[in-house]
Image (spheres, grey):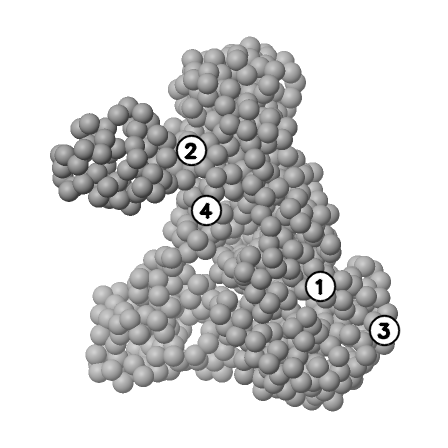
């Protein structure tokens, strides 16, 4: 929790020496509270003040990155409980479980599925982010071979290595330590040894305890042993417990600045029923998990979860946008109609969806209006006759058309004359105001 | 540092609604955010109603249309199938056939359909118009009367037609869905307008407008969260009616529920994808605060019911 100006002032030298560039220490404190000044500009500040202020300005949930290079997954740094308050920062990572009791073929198949899981949606590349390898056999040798197999098949994919046996953990870590994996499995019984491994191999430690009291005690102990980067598991496994623990952890971290729970949370969503697993993972996405572990990869399930994660982690203040271009819907011929709309993703989805429903092949010109809808884009001067004319001319779409006709949204019927003036030789037709009238409109032409 | 459980207590509470006459169902009534039973009371399960309609579902995609093959030609048979075979806890009859662009059924024809369906079932009935504001204000008046005494939910009253529909629901002692378009202030305003007519606020259901996963779900999600926070934290009585997620009609028209796997191999099986889309949309809005759902595919309903089992 941020300190107020007065709280900060009490920690300053109170000499009013002006060396920081501010007239008084109080003025400097006020600037610090607003994060418009840095403590470094005070030459006389005490070490104690530096430490207190440094801790107070740290994010309530520690930023932790696992994996390496372009597939690394950032976690933590969240600041709110509800997405309308402020953007959720680092999207929850999806991991799929590999058990060391599986056959080599099964392990290879899952690793392959992870590698092939990438889907492009609204310009974002989405994928299963990580593999969770569990020591289900309790055998160190089997565990080591499973880790070796996954690392060989999918070398760039971030790993979570799950075992509570420090010897098995060490053998596995030797294979993949440079890739900044998570070592999951520290608990009350093995905390010293696991913390030692996390320090030696510079990996993130996954810490599990039953209940938030025990978990706080354990993370403080492990931090005391010199490990800073952790992910936490409060032991909840059913939906009711998960929503309770995740809510309390997020609240404690964000509203009370309780550091012992200010870490990314890992949630286990495995279910035999795949639709239920989808819902458990959705619970993790919506309710504060940073990693969700699943038992399998199905393309349909991935698509639904990737889309949900994208929806929940969208910035509520910045509209989602699609790329400016002329989209083909169905297989348009030179005679097919050409329509135009703005690049607000919702507008695009709804308009293109209704065109698809009509089964009439069309071209849909989507114009960059900074993510505004048709009416707001028009009101803001972004969806204007001259801009529409320029866009269409530069798109070169004219050469694909038999008739130079453009259908504009009914809400901007007022533009039709002006567009005709700017686009000599074109016919401008006013379409319906609402997208749901498009199928009837297109079929009746 | 010892861990102190950061519990919240709220001054407000969601209204509890009882619907139906023979078999009744209760939903709403909680005084905490969705499923936060650790700090308050969540007395009732959210309710899922199966959607049926007065004309065959020719515009529903194959995945969900085929489930009702053999019964969907007749709303009575369809309703009985949902109640007796699928164990529906409630049924939502959408009178799309009354829309002027569809079959343009008269209010009298709609009233007869409603009477026939009501005679065949004993679970509660939700009666929905065709979402044509002018026609709904005629149709919903006629069906409210036809369903008198059955304690149904009538919908949807919108800004353009709420007066006649609310008056009819009030006269015949039904509950009422008030729908506005994805804006907490519009939603509040409509609830106020309706209650100013003398309609009991404890008989309202708020529909802040649904959207499908990937097609604006985040807007519905956040409007619902904000409505629920206003109801609980600010004790805003106008925001305390239970909320509706009218899932099926939004989900089963998007591309993800229709495009064959042969066209989009990376999207996986169409059958499961469609069910997953309805499941995930409903599941998310369950977590945002909706208490009443209208859904189409039995597999999606069953998955969400299992999820509720775990959450309660």
Confirm or deny contact between disc 3 and disc 4 (CB under 8 A). no
Confirm or deny contact between disc 2 and disc 1 (CB under 8 A). no
Q: Are marks 3 and 1 on the same chain?
A: yes
**Residue at point 29%, 32% (across, down):** A11
Residue B218 placed where, x, y %? 49, 57
Of residues A229 and A364, the one drawn nearer to the viewer in this rendering: A229
Q: Secondary structure at mark 2?
A: loop
**Residue at point 56%, 32% (across, down):** B3
Q: Closer to the observer: label 3 or label 1? A: 1
Confirm or deny contact between disc 2 and disc 3 (CB under 8 A). no
Q: State the CA–CA distance, disc 2 to disc 3.
A: 59 Å
Q: Are marks 4 and 1 on the same chain?
A: no
Residue at which label 4 appears: A80
- Side of B272 relative to B215 (left or right): right
Residue B308 placed where, x, y %? 70, 50
Confirm or deny contact between disc 3 and disc 1 (CB under 8 A). no
Above or below B204: residue A322? above
- Disc number placed over residue B16 in the picture, else none: 1
Q: Chain of mark 1?
A: B
- Disc number placed over residue B120 in the picture, else none: 3
**Residue at point 51%, 79% (across, down):** A440
Instruction: Specify whether residue A35 is in view.
Output: no
């Amino acid at each position: 929790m941020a300190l107020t100006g007065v709280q900060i002032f009490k920690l300053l030298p109170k000499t009013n020496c002006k060396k920081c560039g501010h007239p008084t220490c109080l003025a400097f404190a006020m600037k610090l509270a607003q994060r418009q000044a840095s403590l470094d500009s005070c030459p006389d500040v005490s070490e104690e003040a530096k430490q207190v202020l440094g801790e107070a300005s740290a994010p309530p949930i520690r930023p932790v990155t696992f994996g390496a290079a372009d597939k690394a997954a950032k976690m933590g740094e969240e600041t709110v409980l509800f997405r309308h308050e402020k953007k959720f920062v680092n999207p929850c990572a999806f991991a799929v479980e590999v058990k060391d009791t599986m056959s080599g073929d099964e392990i290879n198949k899952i690793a392959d599925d992870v590698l092939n899981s990438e889907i492009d949606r609204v310009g974002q590349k989405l994928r299963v982010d990580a593999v969770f390898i569990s020591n289900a056999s309790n055998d160190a040798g089997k565990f080591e071979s499973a880790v070796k197999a996954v690392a060989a098949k999918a070398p760039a994919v971030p790993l979570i290595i799950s075992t509570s046996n420090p010897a098995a953990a060490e053998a596995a870590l030797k294979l993949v330590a440079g890739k900044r994996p998570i070592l999951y499995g520290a608990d009350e019984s093995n905390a010293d040894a696991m913390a030692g491994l996390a320090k030696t191999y510079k990996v993130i430690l996954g810490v599990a305890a039953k209940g938030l009291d025990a978990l706080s005690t354990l993370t403080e102990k492990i931090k005391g042993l010199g490990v800073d980067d952790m992910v936490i598991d409060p032991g909840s496994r059913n939906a009711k417990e998960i929503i309770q623990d995740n809510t309390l952890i997020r609240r404690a971290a964000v509203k009370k600045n309780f550091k012992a729970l200010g870490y990314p949370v890992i949630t286990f969503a495995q279910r035999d029923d795949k639709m239920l697993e989808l819902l458990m993972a959705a619970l993790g996405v919506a309710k504060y998990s940073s990693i969700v572990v699943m038992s399998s990869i199905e393309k349909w399930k991935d698509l639904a979860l990737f889309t949900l994660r994208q929806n929940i982690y969208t910035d509520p203040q910045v509209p989602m946008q699609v790329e400016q271009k002329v989209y083909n819907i169905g297989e348009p011929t030179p005679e097919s109609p050409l329509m135009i709309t703005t690049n607000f993703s919702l507008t695009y989805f709804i308009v293109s969806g209704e065109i698809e429903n009509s089964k009439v092949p069309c071209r849909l010109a989507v114009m960059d209006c900074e993510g505004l809808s048709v009416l707001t884009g028009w009101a803001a001067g972004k969806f204007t006759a001259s801009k529409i004319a320029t866009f269409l001319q530069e798109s070169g779409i004219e050469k694909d058309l038999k008739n130079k006709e453009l259908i504009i949204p009914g809400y901007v019927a007022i533009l039709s004359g002006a567009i005709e003036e700017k686009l000599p030789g074109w016919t401008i037709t006013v379409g319906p105001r609402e997208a749901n009238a498009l199928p009837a409109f297109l079929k009746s032409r | 540092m010892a861990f102190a459980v950061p519990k919240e207590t709220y001054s407000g509470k969601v209204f509890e609604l009882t619907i139906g006459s023979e078999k009744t169902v209760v939903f709403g009534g909680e005084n905490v955010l969705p499923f936060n039973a650790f700090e308050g009371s969540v007395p009732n399960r959210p309710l899922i109603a199966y959607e049926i309609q007065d004309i065959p579902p020719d515009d529903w995609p194959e995945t969900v249309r085929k489930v009702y093959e053999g019964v969907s030609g007749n709303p009575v048979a369809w309703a009985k199938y949902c109640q007796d075979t699928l164990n529906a806890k409630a049924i939502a009859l959408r009178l799309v056939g009354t829309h002027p662009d569809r079959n343009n059924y008269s209010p009298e024809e709609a009233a007869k359909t409603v009477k026939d369906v009501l005679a065949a079932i004993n679970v509660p009935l939700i009666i929905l118009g065709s979402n044509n504001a002018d026609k709904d204000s005629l149709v919903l008046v006629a069906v409210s009367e036809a369903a008198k005494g059955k304690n149904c939910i009538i919908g949807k009253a919108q800004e353009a037609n709420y007066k006649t529909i609310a008056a009819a629901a009030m006269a015949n002692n039904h509950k009422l869905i008030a729908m506005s378009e994805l804006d907490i202030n519009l939603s509040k305003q409509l609830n106020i307008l309706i209650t100013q007519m003398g309609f009991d606020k404890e008989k309202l259901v708020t529909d802040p407008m649904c959207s499908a996963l990937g097609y604006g779900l985040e807007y519905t999600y956040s409007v619902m969260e904000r409505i629920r926070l206003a109801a609980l934290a600010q004790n805003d009585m106008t925001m305390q009616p239970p909320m509706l997620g009218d899932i099926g009609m939004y989900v089963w028209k998007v591309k993800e529920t229709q495009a064959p796997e042969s066209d989009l191999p990376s999207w996986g099986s169409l059958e499961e994808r469609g069910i997953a889309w309805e499941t995930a949309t409903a599941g998310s809005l369950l977590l945002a605060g909706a208490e009443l759902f209208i859904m189409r595919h039995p597999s999606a309903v069953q998955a969400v019911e299992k999820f509720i089992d775990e959450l309660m």
